[in-house]
Amino acid sequence: MALDTEKIIADLKEASILELNDLVKAIEDEFGVSAAAPVAAAGAAAGSAEEKTEFDVELTSAGAGKVKVIKVVKDVTGLGLKDAKGLVDGAPSVIKEGVAKDEAEEIKAKLEEVGAQVTLK
């Protein structure tokens, strides 16, 4: 059976973010690999001496108020209810990437207000 790369790419373009997230996790589990880019980690370590201007907001735990956390994630990201729930269920997960410090702090405060645990990276 030949691998049809073009069909796979077309299928990936049609998938939702939640489906792609599940696919990455399944590939990581099946093959014992990580999708994290080692070059990015090295670059982040080298740039740590400079003032950081962009942050990733990571939900580490939804806490007891999971429904409220889903609502905040939905509002902050603009995702649909199903995708927002998927991010919360899949914690730890990055809620928003490359945001300014003020916006990252605001998102963190909103999530912590409803009982979530959040880290800024």
Image (cartoon, helix red, strand yellow):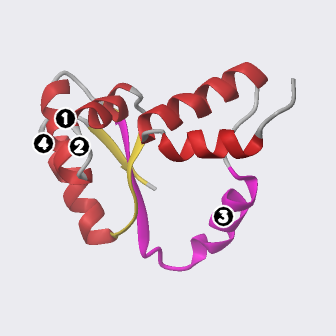
**Identity, as a three-letter code, of the amino acid under mark 1:** Val
Q: From this viewpoint, which residue is outermost toward the right?
A: 1
In the image, residue 33 lies in the stretch drawn in magenta: no
- Which of the marked residues, 2 or 3, is nearer the chain's N terminus? 3
**Identity, as a three-letter code, of the amino acid under mark 4:** Glu
The mark found on residue 94 in the picture is none
The mark found on residue 113 in the picture is 4
Q: Cβ–Cβ below 8 Å for labels 2 and 1?
A: yes
Quarter holding residue 43: bottom right
In the displayed structure, does residue 99 sit left or right of residue 19? left
Q: Which residues are magenta?
A: 37-60
Q: Secondary structure at mark 1?
A: helix
Name the residue that disc number 3 marks.
Answer: 45
Residue 30, horizontal then vertical, whole percent:
72, 20
Residue 98, horizontal then vertical, whole percent:
43, 66
Name the residue that disc number 1 marks.
Answer: 69
**Identity, as a three-letter code, of the amino acid under mark 2:** Val
Cα–Cα gap, marks 2 and 3: 29 Å
Cα–Cα gap, marks 3 and 4: 31 Å
Query: Observer-nearest residue: 98 or 115?
Result: 98
Near mark 3 (Cα within 10 A), the count class, few <14, some 14-19 or many ≥20, is few
Name the residue that disc number 2 marks.
Answer: 73
Q: Cβ–Cβ below 8 Å for labels 2 and 3?
A: no
Q: Secondary structure at mark 4?
A: helix
Q: Residue at x 16, y 43 (%)?
A: 72
Q: Residue at x 71, y 46 (%)?
A: 6
Residue 62, horizontal then vertical, whole percent:
27, 29
Q: Secondary structure at mark 3?
A: helix
